Image (tube, rainbow, N blue to C red):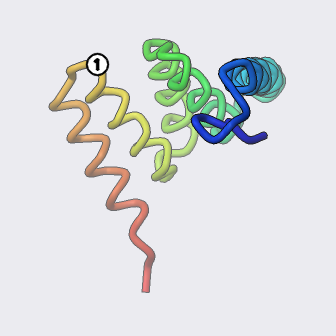
Amino acid sequence: MLVTGVYGSGKSTVVADMGALLQSRGEAFGILDEAASARPDSPRAHFELARILVQYSRLDEAVARLKRAVTLDPAYGAAHLLLGRVYFRQGLVAEGERETQTGQKLSVPKP
């Protein structure tokens, strides 16, 4: 899907494209929520759902999903990094720094 922005054929095209984008995010949220419910022990399902929750600024819910993801897989670097970003958005600087540092250490390729 392409959001046309100022390059579209008019405001109605932009609104329609944005509506379609939000609908697809909503559908993605539903699918990922079902996946996380069906597989509560899947860190990836919780991480992907958290990504959508962050896009909707549902940060408390995202934190809960990300904490679950890193509890299930403490070596999940991307989940630690996203959790750090969410903590920063919530004004929790110390927690954000801790999770970001953890995520960076885990995301460094091993020689």
Q: Is residue 37 visible?
A: no
- Image quadrant where one finds the N terminus: top right
- 5 or 66: nearer the viewer: 5
Residue furthest out toward the left: 94
- 33 or 3: nearer the viewer: 3
Which amino acid type is marked by label 1? Gln
The residue located at (33%, 61%) in the rendering is 105
Residue 75: image x %, image y %? 48, 53
| Secondary structure at numbered mark 1 | loop
- 6 or 1: nearer the viewer: 6
Residue 88 occupies quadrant: top left
The residue located at (51%, 21%) in the rendering is 62
Residue 85 occupies quadrant: top left
Query: Above or below — where is 75 with respect to 51?
Result: below
Q: Is residue 64 left or right of residue 14?
A: left
Residue under label 1, please give it.
90
- 25 or 37: nearer the viewer: 25
Query: Above or below — where is 102 with respect to 33?
Result: below
Residue 91 occupies quadrant: top left
Q: Is residue 81 left or right of residue 70?
A: left
The residue located at (79%, 18%) in the rendering is 30
The residue located at (44%, 75%) in the rendering is 109
